[in-house]
Amino acid sequence: MWATDHHHDRYGIMLPVGAGVAVACLVWIVTVLVGAGYIAGMTWMPWVLPMALGVATAVVLPLVLGRRRGKHDVAALTDILRRS
């Protein structure tokens, strides 16, 4: 995925992975604390839901953050160039 993402220089290579893992861990903790793993018919939830949300976070975060960071970098560079 890193080689196909042409904007990875804006947010780094580990941010999407780290955010996906953090979201997956938090969702797993919440589903286990709620007790979804012990309810009949819902034992899949603490395993599948964190994986799905972690992957979704790792895909969506670069799309949102890359655009914002790119606009911010261009604005900051323009401001620096105008001052000189």
Image (tube, rainbow, N blue to C red):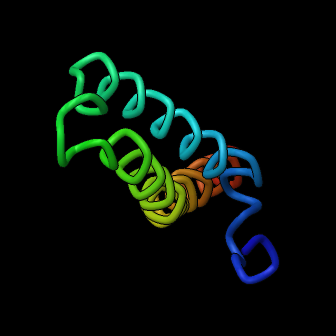
Question: How many discs mark residues in the rendered view?
Answer: 0
Q: Residue furthest top?
A: 33
In this view, 30 is above or below 72: above
Along the line of sight, which residue is nearer the eye, 74 or 12? 12
Q: Is residue 9 visible from the viewing direction of this image?
A: yes
From the image, which quarter does the N terminus lie in? Answer: bottom right
Residue 71 percent location from the top left of the image? 50, 60
Residue 50 percent location from the top left of the image? 42, 45
Along the line of sight, which residue is nearer the eye, 59 or 5? 59
* Residue drawn at point x = 43 percent, y = 45 percent: 47
Q: Is residue 65 visible from the viewing direction of this image?
A: no
In this view, 41 is above or below 4: above
* Residue drawn at point x = 67 percent, y = 51 percent: 11
Q: Residue furthest front?
A: 40
Q: Residue furthest right?
A: 3
Along the line of sight, which residue is nearer the eye, 63 or 76? 63
Along the line of sight, which residue is nearer the eye, 81 or 16? 16
* Residue drawn at point x = 34 percent, y = 24 percent: 32
On the rendered structure, is 5 left or right of 30? right
Q: Quadrant of residue 26?
A: top left
Residue 13 percent location from the top left of the image? 77, 54
Residue 52 percent location from the top left of the image? 41, 58
Q: Residue furthest bottom?
A: 4
* Residue drawn at point x = 30 percent, y = 42 percent: 43
On the rendered structure, is 6 left or right of 72? right
In this view, 81 is above or below 28: below
In this view, 84 is above or below 67: above
